[in-house]
Image: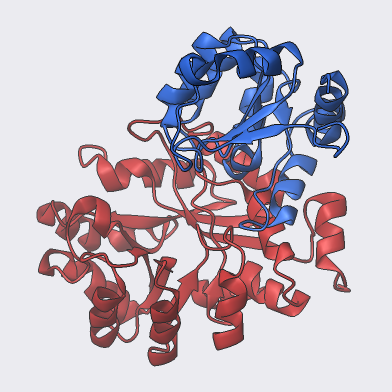
């Protein structure tokens, strides 16, 4: 990964027909956790839904896990408990920016430190997510965290 | 007033462009079952609209559509509290035909509130052709009022085939296809070609890359109106999506405000 400048992992368990859990991936995910390598999981594309995410994090509570495509509106019922429980859970923001007040509400409750900018390009417009972050009703320092600083920190913290 | 030349640059620099106001022709208000809406109240809506440079939100309160014991009173209360930026569609739920008749009969009493009617047929489980909704259609047709429909591909209540029936029958009402028959893009285009009183609305459309470009390529930009489903979607996200299409500033201006002003009879 270091040689090829790969800085994170993605998993699509349902699409690729496997279970992302301790029985199947215990040793591997223990090492991923130890090395603080970000694991990106898309709620839209990975399959398994929120139950699978909750089960995974219960087994690997310190895993650096970036939840992508988290859904609109009712997703806070799933994401907020995770932000309160697991220190290394991050949210990718493309659908948070699409939802009115999604960024502001999350930052007000949990700060900006666990949000990572995303656009879902090429399915959606880069400009949409970018303008929504630029004009969000949050401090400029928080916008910078979301836009770049949080991701840079994650990458720098990974032991490849 | 000299017009801003580069809308994308101006929106990204300032978030709003005074000489390019926005008319959001598809909005809502209030709580909704089974989920959390961040900004539910009329006061919150007014603050958001002011900050984003939205000149007017034409909305229908969720209660007017889904809580018949409250009904359109929620619309009236909201508009009269914040008349500068809010106007309402009179919500029509054909499951309550007596209420439909009453709302239509008292429509003129609320000339300061209403711009037209709103049907949410998929949610009501009643096709837009149902006779119980006819009083609203008749008035809209007689007055050439806007009727905002929720429209979705393959729906037996408000899919393109059903829309075609009301468009054939009501040729003067300004029929706004909320979500542009989502997914049935070619059928939506054909409806606009076939009926001069049918318009496309962009909520849940412009956030998918390529749809709006397809519409404008087929139809031009004069029969398309901007909408966000506020408070479901974020205005800046939708502005950014519009500006990400690469459409000309003239096309964007048509969609952001000129077409809506014509529909609403607003003197710019």
Task: Say which residue appears at 40% left-offset and 61% top-offset.
Answer: B111
Q: Which x, y percent locates residue B237?
A: 66, 50
| Applied colour scheme | by chain
Drawn side of residue B204 relative to residue A115, left or right: left
Total tally of numbered discs in the picture: 0
Q: Colour of chain B?
A: red
Give the vertical position of A108 relative to B62 (above or below). above
Q: Is residue A56 visible?
A: yes
Residue B120 relative to residue B42: left or right = left
Residue A75: x %, y % from top left: 48, 30
Location of the C terminus of chain B (image quadrant)? bottom right
Check the image and report above or below for B133 versus A36.
below
Quadrant location, the N terminus of chain B? bottom right
Observer able to see residue B197: no
Which of the 4 quarters of the picture holds residue A6?
top right
- Image spot of residue A87 (x, y percent): 67, 10
Front residue of B56/A55: it is A55
Percent x, y for residue B151? 35, 65
Could you tell whether B223 is left or right of B172 in the image? right
Location of residue A63 with respect to B139 vertically, above or below: above
Residue in the picture at 45% in, 32% down: A18
**Residue A140, located in which quarter of the rendered image?**
top right
Chain A tint as drawn: blue
Residue sitting nearer the eye, A51 or B248: A51
Q: Nearer the viewer, residue B150 or B77?
A: B150
> Quadrant location of residue A95?
top right
Residue drawn at (42%, 32%) of the image: A48
**Is residue B23 or residue A11 the one in the foreground?**
A11
The answer to whether A28 appears left or right of A80 in the picture is right
């Amino acid at each position: 990964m270091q040689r090829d400048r790969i800085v994170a992992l993605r998993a699509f368990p349902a699409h690729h027909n496997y279970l992302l859990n301790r029985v199947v991936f215990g040793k591997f995910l223990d090492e991923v956790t130890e090395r603080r390598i970000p694991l990106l999981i898309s709620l839209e594309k990975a399959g398994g839904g929120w139950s699978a995410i909750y089960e995974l994090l219960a087994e690997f509570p310190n895993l650096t896990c970036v939840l992508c495509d988290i859904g609109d509106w009712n997703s806070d019922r799933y994401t907020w408990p995770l932000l309160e429980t697991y220190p290394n859970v991050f949210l990718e923001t493309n659908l948070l920016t699409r939802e009115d007040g999604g960024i502001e509400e999350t930052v007000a409750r949990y700060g900006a430190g666990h949000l990572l900018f995303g656009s879902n390009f090429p399915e959606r417009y880069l400009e949409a997510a970018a303008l929504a972050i630029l004009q969000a009703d949050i401090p400029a320092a928080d916008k910078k965290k979301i836009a770049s600083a949080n991701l840079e920190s994650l990458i720098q913290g990974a032991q490849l | 007033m000299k017009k801003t030349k580069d809308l994308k640059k101006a929106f990204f620099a300032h978030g709003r462009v005074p000489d390019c106001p926005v008319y959001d022709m598809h909005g809502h208000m209030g709580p909704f079952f089974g989920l959390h809406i961040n900004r539910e109240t009329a006061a919150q809506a007014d603050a958001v609209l002011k900050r984003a440079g939205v000149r007017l939100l034409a909305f229908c309160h969720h209660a007017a559509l889904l809580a018949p014991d409250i009904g359109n009173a929620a619309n009236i209360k909201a508009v009269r509290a914040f008349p500068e930026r809010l106007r309402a569609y009179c919500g029509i739920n054909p499951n309550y035909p007596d209420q439909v008749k009453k709302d239509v009969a008292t429509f003129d009493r609320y000339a300061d509130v209403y711009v037209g009617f709103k049907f949410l047929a998929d949610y009501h489980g009643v096709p837009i052709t149902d006779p119980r909704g006819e009083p609203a259609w008749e008035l809209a047709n007689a007055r050439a009022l806007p009727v905002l429909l929720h429209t979705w591909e393959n729906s037996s209540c408000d899919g393109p085939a059903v829309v075609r029936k009301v468009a054939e029958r009501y040729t003067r009402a300004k029929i706004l296809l909320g979500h542009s028959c989502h997914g049935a893009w070619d059928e939506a285009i054909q409806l606009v070609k076939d009926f001069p009183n049918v318009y496309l609305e962009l909520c849940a459309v412009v956030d998918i890359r390529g749809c709006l470009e397809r519409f404008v390529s087929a139809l031009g930009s004069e029969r398309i109106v901007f909408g966000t489903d506020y408070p479901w979607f974020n205005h800046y996200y939708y502005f950014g999506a519009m500006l990400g299409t690469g459409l000309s500033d003239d096309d964007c201006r048509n969609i952001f405000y000129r077409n809506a002003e014509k529909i609403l009879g607003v003197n710019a």
